[in-house]
Image (cartoon, rainbow, N blue to C red):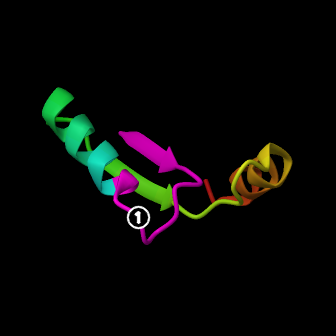
Amino acid sequence: MILLFTDFGAAGPYVGQMRAVLSRAVPEVPAVELMSDAPAFDAKVSAYLWQRLPN
């Protein structure tokens, strides 16, 4: 399983493009979007959010 946690935003094409590439490269591995609108360029806040995701 590939977990996606990005700051690409929900409105743009980038998450879909990334999922398409992953699907082509490893079709047997599911890709799950955890968050696609993490704060842009804010690694500290994104790390905080990542740690708070349920296990």
Relative to residue 7, is residue 51 drawn left or right? right
Residue at 33% over, 44% down: 18
Relative to residue 13, is residue 44 drawn left or right? right
Residue at 69% over, 51% down: 50
Q: Give the quarter of the image for residue 30.
A: top left
Local SS, label 1: loop
The picture places residue 23, in percent across and down from the top left corner, at 18, 40
Residue type pointed to by label 1: Gly
Is residue 18 found inside the magenta-colored segment of the image? no
Residue at 46% over, 69% down: 10
Is residue 3 found inside the magenta-colored segment of the image? yes
Q: Of 24 and 49, which appears nearest the observer? A: 24
The picture places residue 51, in percent across and down from the top left corner, at 75, 50
Range covered by the magenta-colored residues: 1-15
The picture places residue 29, in percent across and down from the top left corner, at 24, 36
Q: Give the quarter of the image for residue 1.
A: top left
Residue projecting furthest to the top: 25
Residue projecting furthest to the right: 44
Relative to residue 17, is residue 23 drawn left or right? left
Q: Magenta stretch mostly in which secondary structure?
A: loop
Residue at 38% over, 52% down: 14
> Does 2 sit above or below residue 26?
below
The picture places residue 7, in percent across and down from the top left corner, at 59, 54
Which residue carries the number 1 mark?
12
